[in-house]
Image: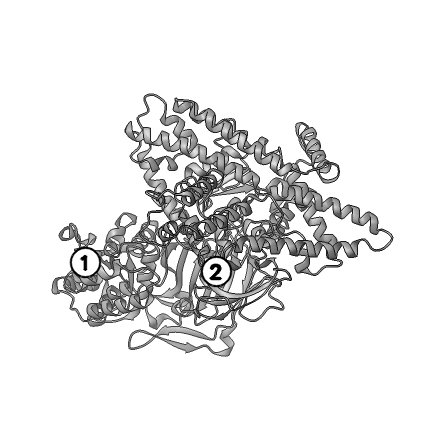
Amino acid sequence: MKEGDRNEPKRPVVVFLNEVGSDDLHLVGGKGANLGELIRLGVPVPPGFCVTTAAFWRFVGSVVTMEDIYDTLSRLNEEHLDEIRSVSERARSVLLDSPISEDVASEILRAWQETGEDYAYAVRSSATAEDLPDASFAGQQESFLNVRGETALLEAVRKCWASLFTDRAILYRIRNRFDHRKVGLSVVVQRMVFATKSGILFTADPVTGHRHTVTINASFGLGEALVGGIVNPDVYHVDKRTRAVTHLEISDKERATVPSPDGGVRQVSLPPQKRTVRVLNDEEIASLVDLGIRIEDHFGAPQDIEWAIAVERPADAGAGDDAKPYILQARPITSLYPLDGLKSPDDTLHVYFSMGHQQNMTRPLSPLSRSTVLQLVPIGRSPDGSTNPYVRSSGGRLFADITYPLRHPILRRAVVGLVARFDALAPQGLNQVMARPEFRGPYRFFPKRDLIVPGLRFGGRILRALWLRDLTGFIDQTNARIEEYVAEFEERVFAQCDDKERLQTCKEQLHGLFAFFLNWIPETIAGDGSRQVLIGMARRWLSPSEQSDLTVAVPGNVVNEMNLAIGDLADLVREIPAIAARLNDPSTDPKNWLHGLPRNERTESFLREWESFLSRFGARGPAEIELMVPRFVEDPTPVLRVIANHLRGSPRIHRDRLEALDRARETAWEKFTGYARKGFLGPLRLRLIRRLRHVMLEAGGLREHHKYVAIRVLWVVKRVLMELAARQVEAGRLDSPSDIWFLTWKEIEDLLEPGTTDPLRAEIAKRRADLERFQRLQPPLIITSDGESPVVRYDAKNVPAGALVGHSVSPGVVEGIVRVVHDPTLESLAPGEVLVAQYTDPGWTPLFLNAAGLVLEVGGDLTHGAVVAREYGIPCVVGVRNATQKLRTGDRVRVDGNRGFVIVLDVGSGSAVTSSETPAGR
């Protein structure tokens, strides 16, 4: 019936804890396997045995209706909460009403008698899908304490089995993509020790991730009060390296859990004189820390450990001198971000900044995409591009090592300011780290000699662009240069026939890409600098919304031009019913949506515009830095969804919006110049701001061009790699063309060498699984080589109670219905909805055409979503932590882009905007 049934007769029904270890996960579950490992390590663990998964599968297999229940479970996802609750109740009901077979019951009672039937027992569930190295979740299944007698023992075992089907356990398996039929449950039966003190020890700080900090939570009595959240525990932080207590917090412990004389446990109130007494003394802390470090070293990863200072029988519970530490459970802390690749290279504290946050894409990258980014970054790149000391990889994400500039007394201010523009909370975290003595280290005050002259030339170009050059037409010149550059590369690489030559050409192109960017980066900096100076000067006379109006709709931005092109395509479709019908037909294949289209003057006109769009923007797409993800030219679904949504609105709405923004900009400009020309310095000030406006309008639109070029070059590279992969599949070196994404550039080069016998099949399979696992990780914005992600918070003063606080990047206030979007290729936005997402990149921008407001988990003033929101006049709040979890599609919210918060007005109320309050002219 299930995976667990295979070879079941050969598997024991009961095994003792001292007989099992990490290899027995399938038999005794995560908790049982870990306890067996601890006993082998010599850690004090109460004796006991496991009722194995073989017994569970026999029990479940005897219940006929379970087959139908498993079928139902296989069809559910985490949105089906009502169905999950229903099937959970049904499964537990039938299991609790079913008898345990006599042979299984007799084996359980035999082990119980051998362990000591006069003792009280703790009976705990141990599933094969919990307490794993990469998936750990406490409290899914039931535990029973102070169990006495054979009847109570067998009933507790049956309740544990049934608890595999609680709604929270079912949800856990769905979210972690475990097959319900393959998850078995063992039951751990241990002699119960009677704790005078108990708690949880984390061998790394579970809040900050600091790997050198042990965190202990402690309370009086049994640990159930602490785990159940009914008592505030004492908190101790201990430095692993020195064993010093670095933080001590004594709480008011009102209650405790104690054994009940008749079995089970009960809550009692502590006497006033004991409530504020420190639970652990220094000797007990030292003993627990030593045990924790031993356990962490054994398992090779930070651990979440349940402990007790206890006696074996309740009669001895008052004899504190006889109490000793016991370890009741140990499991990995899977919420920590992995440190692989982020360890300090020189034994000093290093600080890393998430490049994914900077790129507005926090999802993990495939190995080949990470390897490709290494080829692109010029500073620190090894000759073959395979390594870079300033770009590190962990958890499938890339991090920039910003340690050295942060140590520099002058550069640190620039770095902190730059990082703040990508996340407003970043300076808080950086300042916390920089204040620590261990952060101090070597730095070079003056730049290397060979960088001085290029640096001066670069700065000179910025100054000339800012003050001297006529930049009229510069964007058009840059666009022409880009088209020529991409076309030349494409022609050159596809003229080559040898895969090794093609790879080398691609690498050379990637290595030279930054040098090509220098053709317009100084002008881009001048354009953005002009914008900032204008806003700074305008603060004296203009309101915040008028300041924003002053710099909206800057021409030449390739992302805005892409959106305008999509709107123009939609207006063409309005006149062609055959195309409109295909867009609204769910059965239309997006990859062949124009196949067999009747040819006439209108369709030919549309096809020309469609081909022009793909020629210029087809290389783009969601998460476009990831090579695996389809581009618009491969799968135009996101574009087609936006066109279809456009058809619901008025014609030319995108052009009307642009014209309104242009008018708002001109209105703000007239008001600004009217004030600026006054006074003795008026003529000089007017000349200055006119110059700044010229630079902003003629060069400010270039800020997205470097990524636009990179994506177009990467599209050519991707086609080269896909052709290469297909040939390697034919040669038998790869099993699938998609295997190529799980290799590095160096490994692909090695694959092409004659006589290659190891095509890394096992490693490719492992990397596929790793990428899936990395999807569940939440990458930190800032992380140190000690694993710490500093805790940062927005100032919540002067915001409504219950508001989700973030950082305002585009002014205005709007009310609307939330649409939470995780994948723009699968979801669309109706006109007037509020887009809520983790992040956005240029591939998401078509959704902005219908958005009334924007709420992002990631971002700062310069991130993609912020810039486009300002360009479109959309109120936007970024840096709203966990917004996609706290807000649900259908919630009615107010997005306050003036003060930087989001507040829920009504939960799940509907689907249309009813009111808005945006800056004048929008």
N-terminal-most mark, 1 or 2:
1
The colour scheme is one colour
Which quadrant would residue 76 be assigned to in this image? bottom left
Callout 2 environment at 10 Å: few (<14), some (14 to 19), or many (20+)?
some
Q: Residue at x 67, y 45 (%)?
A: 696
Percent position (x, y) of residue 875? 57, 60
Percent position (x, y) of residue 883? 49, 60
Q: Is residue 309 left or right of residue 807?
A: left
Does residue 57 sit above or below 23 in this rendering? below
Amino acid under label 2?
Pro
Q: Which residue is mark 2?
A: 831
The tag on residue 230 is none
Amino acid under label 1?
Trp
Q: Is residue 375 left or right of residue 115?
A: right
Residue 787 or 451: which is nearer the viewer?
A: 451
Percent position (x, y) of residue 515? 59, 31
Q: CA distance from mark 1 to mark 2?
A: 52 Å
Percent position (x, y) of residue 455? 68, 32
Does residue 347 sit above or below 434 in this rendering? above
Q: Is residue 602 left or right of residue 65?
A: right
Residue lying at the far front in this picture: please name it: 601
Residue 210 or 750: which is nearer the viewer?
A: 750
Q: Which residue is mark 1?
A: 57
Residue 398 or 725: which is nearer the viewer?
A: 725
Q: Choose mark 1 or mark 2, whichever is in front.
A: 2
Residue 669 shows up from this direction: yes
User: Could you tell me if the residues under marks 1 and 2 are in contact, i.e. CB atoms within 8 Å?
Assistant: no
Q: Residue at x 76, y 58 (%)?
A: 540
Callout 1 environment at 10 Å: few (<14), some (14 to 19), or many (20+)?
many
Residue 360 shows up from this direction: no
